[in-house]
Amino acid sequence: MTLSPPIQRDVPDALGRFGRYGGQFVPETLMAALAELEEAYSAAREDSTFWDELSNLLTDYVGRPTPLYHAANLSQKLGGAQIWIKREDLAHTGAHKINNAMGQILLAKRLGKNRIIAETGAGQHGVATATACAMMGLECIVYMGEEDIHRQAPNVYRMKLLGATVEPVLSGSRTLKDAINEAIRDWVTNVQTTHYLIGSAVGPHPYPMLVRDFQNVIGKEARAQCLDQIGRLPDYAVACVGGGSNAIGLFSGFVDDESVGLIGVEAAGDGVDTDRHSATITKGRPGVLHGAMSYLLQDEWGQVTEAHSVSAGLDYPGVGPEHSYFHDIERAKYVAIDDTGALDGFDLLCLTEGIIPALEPSHALAYIKDWAPNLDSSTVILLLLSGRGDKDLETVATQRGIEI
Amino acid sequence: MSNPIQDAFNRANSDGRTAIVPFVTIGHPQVDSTPDVVQALADAGADAIELGMPFSDPLAEGPVIQKSSFQALQNGITPEACFQNAAEIRKRGIETPLVFMGYYNPMLQFGLDEFCARTRDAGVDGIIAADLPAAEAGPLIQACEKANISLVPLLALTSTDETIAQACKHASGFVYCVSLLGVTGARSAMSRQVEALVARVRNHTELPIAVGFGISNAEHVQSVGDFADGAVIGSALINHIQADISANAPANAAKFLQSLRK
């Protein structure tokens, strides 16, 4: 596999804006580090040796390209559109998060920063970062909400096995949002020695751009595989959206193909009409959190409200600024699936295809389950399976009152 | 035109003192504590007072102010309640300059023009936004200018000269220099690096310069006073306010403030 730099897009602009979204709303102390990171990335972007090194890692270590798989059984069962699955669950560490971790770790090395911090919700990004740090010999500290530490115990142990320190976060809702706050506080304190390896397409500029560009490999590969294996582009590309890194990676491969509909599936938790959900674009309004302007779940006074989802990876009250932009310009459509639906989507893929999906993409599966039957068999849906479900077995069992 | 915050710094300095600027979180420890605490701080000789507006995600704060902010939100403090607290302070005849310190999103959601107008009407003289660097401050600068209140910029050890120049161009009241790399919170020793930052900022402004983050005792205030015009004290004060049962919050605050002048 050879990787070329992602195409320079019209967003973000020089100020890090995607339309009205994005920007750099951080304490002044961090501004110099953001400028330094942006400069390092600008240089790396034009440097073929950077992409060659990343390509080699993604090929030999991560196992890319990941397959595009025709889910014939699932398609037949639903009786409508043909469903093709991009298998990020088969990447090393079991999710797409490793793509971005590898890219940013190479940047951190260029910056001469030997201490890496990260936040994690479901633990997938924490595991990916711990993996990259173990391989590169860098110190790794992962901030994780105490609530998430309980519900994602296997991933916590994985990070520890990989030599990372997992710092429990006890503030606020004790989930991903608070882990990001704590990581930012660490970064403000240790900014001269530390790179903050953000895992989703959120945060201050240049992070949403960086994460998109490092996840762009998903969309770029999938597009080429569709042309090669199906002989045409898909009609729709569907992915789950929490912060939205897997979705932006997929969408960025197809954004210029006007015929391809882009659909992001948010987590509706107990339902979008309750106060327990993570459907940021569906139910939120623009605001500023974690350094960026974007859609945000907040009360009437601008206090950020707690998100809820059965899936820890989608349990976040914000969303990447480029998704907010795609929503406003109507380039992508955003829908929401509740916890119950996600569990149905989970079962469906297990039983029809023998693939145990993570709970995050199970939301996208659930959306397709109800929608694909209405489409004719010539329609092609490309579904991004962002990760595998091993980490979620306990959650799924608990939901069903089973102890394992 | 005279500026009440700047005047207060100048008065302190012409008396040969370092201006002392205490920070308290509105609605902490009790929902109705703030006017009494502010009164006690003013009587004890505070030169200006920062009123912290609580936010759900105070990412520039260490544990002490985080907890006070969380407690204030639990107590039901909204921007409306912040305006009411300030108005009550003014109603009592306290003339010490007041500055709101908060985060950008609640201001943005209130509507920047409306927020600044209400701030002024409540008798507050200026605003500090902890997560709004100079590069993003344009809209709030405009709203503050329209309402005729000060926007106090925060500058950091890592700030470039270009940023310092940009921030100072629109600053009024005073310029706030963050003493260390890190979040708010009491520290045992003061970093000396901030002296160089203050010197760099002096090249760009005639305004008074205050140093904050980590200032915890009289010795720290004195060392800051060697090169800056004022000292901001937050976490150490809040620790003292809540050290004793809450009914004593005003007395605790006054006692601590007096101890800083030793």
Image (cartoon, coloured by chain):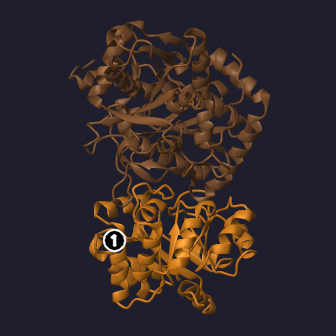
Chain colours: A brown, B orange
Task: Name the spot of residue A158 as percent of width and height, x first.
Answer: 48, 24
> Can residue A122 be spotted in the picture?
yes
Task: Name the spot of residue A243 as percent of width and height, x first.
Answer: 47, 38
Task: Name the spot of residue A325 as percent of width and height, x first.
Answer: 52, 44
Q: Give the camera-side residue of A138 and A174.
A: A174
Relative horizontal placement of residue B196, taking residue B253 as reference (left or right): right
Relative horizontal placement of residue B17, taking residue B42 as reference (left or right): right
Query: Image quadrant of residue B74?
Result: bottom left
- Kindly identify the residue that appears in the image at 47 percent across and 62 percent down: B103
Query: Image quadrant of residue A390?
Result: top left
- Kindly identify the residue that appears in the image at 50 percent across and 73 percent down: B127
Circle 1 — which element? helix
Q: Give the camera-side residue of B233 and A31.
A: A31
Q: Give the camera-side residue of A65 and A143.
A: A65
- Kindly identify the residue that appears in the image at 27 percent across and 75 percent down: B247
Residue A301, compared with residue B245, is above or below; it is above
On the rendered image, what quadrant is the N terminus of chain B found in?
bottom right
- Which residue is identified by label 1? B80
Within 10 Å of disc 1 (Cα), the crowding (few <14, some 14-19, many 20+) is few
Residue A397, compared with residue A211, is above or below; it is above
Relative horizontal placement of residue B137, taking residue A269 as reference (left or right): right
| Amino acid type assigned to the residue bearing label 1 in the image | Glu
Residue B40, compared with residue A374, is above or below; it is below
Query: Image quadrant of residue B225?
Result: bottom right
- Kindly identify the residue that appears in the image at 73 percent across and 35 percent down: A45
